[in-house]
Image (cartoon, rainbow, N blue to C red):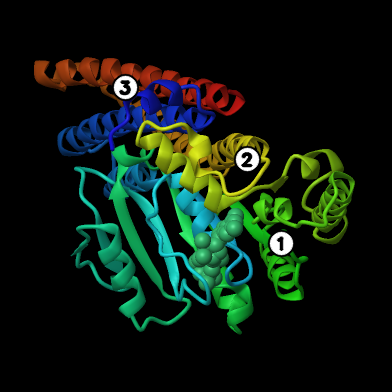
Amino acid sequence: NFNPMMYQTNDKSPLQIFVRAKKKINDIYGEIEEYVLETTTFINALHADAEIVDKAERELFESYVFKVAAIREVLQRDHMKVAFFGRTSNGKSSVINAMLREKILPSGIGHTTNCFCQVEGSDGGEAYLMKEGSDEKLNVVNIKQLANALCQEKLCESSLVRIFWPRERCSLLRDDVVFVDSPGVDVSANLDDWIDNHCLNADVFVLVLNAESTMTRAEKQFFHTVSQKLSKPNIFILNNRWDASANEPEFQESELAKVKSQHTERCIDFLTKELKVSNEKEAAERVFFVSARETLQARIEESKGNPPHLGAIAEGFQIRYFEFQDFERKFEECISQSAVKTKFQQHSSRGKSVSGDMRSMLDNIYERITIFRNLKQDQKNLLTERIQGTETQMMQVTREMKMKIHNMVEEVEEKVSKALNE
Ligand code: GTP
Ligand code: MG
């Protein structure tokens, strides 16, 4: 299913904001790690040679090595996370499949998804499952087997199954988007646990509604709790199954437009007046009328080299298909910007504070060496050539270190603010 076209067009994707920022910040941290290691070696040598640096200071420096290594590890795992919620059968799993361009998650009538399912990219072309609390990779040969494995599981509804799917099969997975599918909000009494366990680090939420009915109390309540626990969550609303509206025989164009504007108004009011998470303008760009099932069918046709409209379910396919793509575009913009801010801003300020601390420690050491040298000047005759040599070397290395760290701090600041602005 490898599609090189997808790769070519994808580089214009707004997701690249995140991809580029992640690469940059990883490179910067690689440099920081080098400096920290180099400085620590130098400090250790000072400690051994001249007792200029005491044990506590040496240990503090070594702690930076671990700190930086820990941040680097988190950074490498950073991703963009989107979580889907809504009532049973509204089409949450179908929306995710449409975005992945393949039927990966089981979907169907009745209560299908019975626990949280996270889909993320895997390297090396492997597809496998991992259940919560286990490191065992359960191989998935095909989609049917995956669906069976998920259905057979008697899992707690708030537990998590992670599905690793080859990155090269979908550009969103390649660019580090992680999808979280959930059971219907109407089937659980543990919504608080859901939010605590699966939502606090989500960058974007998608509320999948059924356009044939209206938003329910359970759906509203869920998002009220989300917005109490998170400040200004990014919420998109999909009025799904919009193809059904075209099949209503007694519906006139004008009536359809009326229903659409009614739904739109309700959704915008919900985001602006009830949840107060968006302003009018932003909210208007967060509400869409789509058909997930049709989009998935169209994309499957496309992957076979057929025209997408072969996947159409009802009249008006083009508009719905276009609206789904429009949703994806806005979603990509939103998630990459949000993830850069929430994930990298924190890392960059930690990086700045580590390098700032190191710089002031080196300033201190430099001062001490100067005093030490002045003292020793008076007893010059007692000094061996070796010590003189070491001093000069120390002065020089410390000066270099100071410069390097100074430059590094500025460089980090500059690169990070550039990445954030981009
Ligand atoms: P649960 O996992 O049970 O909570 O449901 P879900 O929200 O994941 O819904 P799912 O994706 O399983 O879809 C339910 C049924 O609706 C499936 O039979 C889908 O094929 C169908 N469906 C989903 N989206 C659409 C759509 O846009 N139009 C139409 N006509 N059917 C859809
Ligand atoms: Mg589902």
Q: Earlier in the sequence, mark 2 or mark 1?
A: 1
Read off the residue under disc 1. 227
In this view, 421 is above or below 81: above
Q: Earlier in the sequence, mark 3 or mark 1?
A: 1
Residue 420 image offset from top left, x and y in percent:
57, 29
Residue 287 image offset from top left, x and y in percent:
73, 47
Alpha carbon separation for disc pair 2 and 1: 34 Å
Residue drawn 60% across the image and 39% down it? 321
Read off the residue under disc 3. 398
Q: Which quadrant is the N terminus positioned in?
A: top left
Read off the residue under disc 2. 317
Q: Which quadrant is the C terminus positioned in?
A: top right
Alpha carbon separation for disc pair 3 and 1: 50 Å
Dot 3: few (<14), some (14–19), or many (≥20) neighbours within 10 Å?
many
Q: What is the three-letter code of the residue carrying label 2?
A: Phe
Label 3 secondary element: helix
Label 2 secondary element: helix
